[in-house]
Amino acid sequence: MRNLHGRLDLCAINTATLGHREPLDRTIDRIARAGFGGIAPWRREVEEGDVSQFARQIRALDLTVSGYCRSTCLPAATRAEFNANVEANRAAIRDAAVLGARCFVMVVGGIVPGSRDLDGARAQVTDGISMLMDTAREYGVPLALEPLHPMYAANRAVINTIAQAMTICETVDPDRSGLVGIAVDVYHCWWDPSLRASIAAAGKAGRITAYHVCDWLHDTHDMLLDRGMMGDGVIDLPAVRSCVEQAGYDGLVETEIFSAQNLWRRDPDEILAVCADRLQTVC
Amino acid sequence: MRNLHGRLDLCAINTATLGHREPLDRTIDRIARAGFGGIAPWRREVEEGDVSQFARQIRALDLTVSGYCRSTCLPAATRAEFNANVEANRAAIRDAAVLGARCFVMVVGGIVPGSRDLDGARAQVTDGISMLMDTAREYGVPLALEPLHPMYAANRAVINTIAQAMTICETVDPDRSGLVGIAVDVYHCWWDPSLRASIAAAGKAGRITAYHVCDWLHDTHDMLLDRGMMGDGVIDLPAVRSCVEQAGYDGLVETEIFSAQNLWRRDPDEILAVCADRLQTVC
């Protein structure tokens, strides 16, 4: 396993970690100034401005874009809506290419509101990803399917385990082109009894495209915005990173923390300083 | 699949559904009067009174005890604490026998607070269940391991899928004595991409010991107390029950709903009337 001490160049910050409280250009500057090697910006902030301008700023500061967050949800009540969702993702993949992103992070969407068709939503997701493969190839941006914690299966993502994401990858990309893989986020998968085996299998297939860290607080109060800083929770972070790296992952270690009541009330530079410390000491 | 219309005798009410707002003897009367065939009481209410008296009342009303809720958590920081937890479960299994319960529901406990040892907690759980097998045999009360939703892995139960529970069952009871099985609760497992296969495997081994229903609300607001009434959420309840019954389950269909902001504010008889309606029409 890589030693992260003194290696913030191997670490990235997902901008959500700072709470999206400032324009992206300021956030980019802060992250570069704090010494991180990478950044993962969100569409909501990129689309507010000029993607080419952000891309120039990021390159000038020698930051790697570890991922571009994130896909438009795929499942829809009508074929027209579904096609529009696919098209929105094509546009975002083009922006990901402009940014030089290592991957386009796909949070695939939940069950269509008012429906109980989990299988149908999952089938739509596989179809939609399959339809996006050409765009990924054209722009050279790998899709990173992010299995979300099962508590988000209804309203955010019907892909909920690494093994399930692997099945989709193998279905839409049997040749293992490198254009579709998995974003492994410890928050979503730490509980999985098959975690080690799933990571090993994904790595063997060259499918680990991103690695995200934060922590799961022992008593989590909110299903979305109560993630913990690395070291404050129950996840054995070195054990998971060891699995991921033994499976061949050599990309950036990206911090992504949604923490409305705690982190997002603190000064952005202070948050970055804590991230830098924890990445080097407990991850 | 059994038709539940006009068959409330096949249905049970877990007393938590009423919010634990009244003494157990009143709850027992209400559930019997509403026409249900079964009840699943909690230790907190049974242990407030005389278990033999409750057992007599339940028998006199011709109610089946579909399960006794629930185990003392097993994982502990010290061997002495762990042994005390096992002993507390032995005492509860004796009460389950007095009640004539079809099973003793085991919510096995989370990670030891302050620790990050998920594997260790899981190992303690397997050890503890193994130690309880003799008591289950002595009193003729099957243990029903309840896999809890992965969002409870840290603080409530480190068994999180049916497949994982099956592995433990097969480890502690390779001869399939009928003394340890699984409580399948739709709330905890509906999202599982392996659900059908896991239920089929558990059924084939004679391991489906209980079946609990409620619903998962599309936008769930609270991790513990925001379960939905059957029909109000996203779970395809007939599809799951069909799997469970095809796998050989012929026991009661038990309603267990924690709903602090909605159900528990309503009149207990009204709650029971809605349960009766939904069990017969949407489950």
Image (spheres, coloured by chain):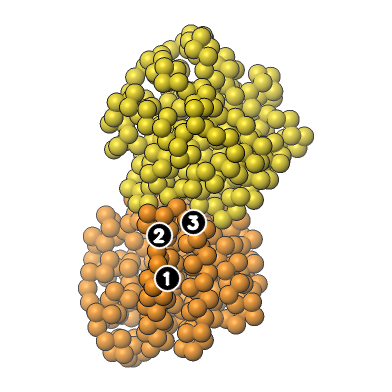
Chain colours: A yellow, B orange
Circle 1 — which element?
A: helix
Which disc number belongs to residue B79?
1
Q: Label 2, label 1: how many angstroms apart (C-alpha)?
A: 12 Å
Circle 2 — which element?
A: loop
Residue situated in front as seen by the camera: B261 or A83: B261
Whether residue B5 is situated above or below residue A17 in the rendered picture: below
Label 3 is placed on what type of residue? Leu
Q: Sequence order check: which comes first, mark 1 or mark 3?
A: 1
Q: Residue at x 70, y 30 (%)?
A: A178
Q: Is residue A134 visible?
A: yes
Whether residue A221 is situated above or below residue A136 in the rendered picture: below
Q: Residue at x 43, y 12 (%)?
A: A49
Q: Which residue is mark 3?
A: B118
Q: Sequence order check: which comes first, mark 2 or mark 3?
A: 2
- Density class for disc 3 (Cα within 10 Å; few <14, some 14-19, many ≥20) is many
Label 1 is placed on what type of residue? Arg
- In front: mark 2 or mark 1? 1
Q: Are marks 2 and 1 on the same chain?
A: yes
- Density class for disc 1 (Cα within 10 Å; few <14, some 14-19, many ≥20) is few
Image spot of residue A272 (x, y percent):
38, 27
Kindly identify which chain the residue marked by label 2 belongs to: B
Residue B276: image quadrant is bottom left
Residue situated in front as seen by the camera: B40 or A246: A246
Whether residue A96 is situated above or below residue B21 in the rendered picture: above
